Image (tube, rainbow, N blue to C red):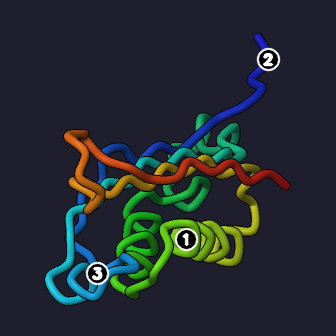
């Protein structure tokens, strides 16, 4: 059997952050959810069982948390910063799938959220 692709997953990461266009969003903040899938060469970690041979998901989480703490007007900007930081910190990353959802967005709709979904690839 040939191992082709592997991914590191972080699902349903929850943050209280201050992203948004409206002044009230920047003042009181809101709740956000991040889902992340990073394509990464995992073959060596499969045999070595060493954390140094993979993308440490605790380090990945810390990176996402840091970027979520920086207020932005647009979710596209936040997601782009997260992706750029991942690519810079983990140059072995092959692809990034990122969903960033603002829960209870101020648009008068009864919904679970609104956001962006982005795909980045080397």
Mark 3 crowdedness (10 Å alpha carbons): few <14, some 14-19, many ≥20: many
Q: Residue at x 36, y 77 (%)?
A: 19
- In this view, 20 is above or below 114: below
Q: Is residue 101 left or right of residue 6?
A: left
Q: CA distance from mark 2 to mark 3?
A: 45 Å
Task: Name the residue carrying label 2.
Answer: 2
Q: Quadrant of the N terminus?
A: top right
The image shows residue 63 at horizontal and vertical percentages of 45, 74
Q: Nearer the viewer, mark 1 or mark 3?
A: 3
Q: Quadrant of the C terminus?
A: bottom right
The image shows residue 64 at horizontal and vertical percentages of 43, 70
Dot 1 falls on a residue whose secondary structure is helix
Task: Name the residue carrying label 3.
Answer: 18
Dot 2 falls on a residue whose secondary structure is loop
- In this view, 103 is above or below 62: above
Q: Nearer the viewer, mark 2 or mark 3?
A: 3
Q: Residue at x 62, y 70 (%)?
A: 80
């Amino acid at each position: 059997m040939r191992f082709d692709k592997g991914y590191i997953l972080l699902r349903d990461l929850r943050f209280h952050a201050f992203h948004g266009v409206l002044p009230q969003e920047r003042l009181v903040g809101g709740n956000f959810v991040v889902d992340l899938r990073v394509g990464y060469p995992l073959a060596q970690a499969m045999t070595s069982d060493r954390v140094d041979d993979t993308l440490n998901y605790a380090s990945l989480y810390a990176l996402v948390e840091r970027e979520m703490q920086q207020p932005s007007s647009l979710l596209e900007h936040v997601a782009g910063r997260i992706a750029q930081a991942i690519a810079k910190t983990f140059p072995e990353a092959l692809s990034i799938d990122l969903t960033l959802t603002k829960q209870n967005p101020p648009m008068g709709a009864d919904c679970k959220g609104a956001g962006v979904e982005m795909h980045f690839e080397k």
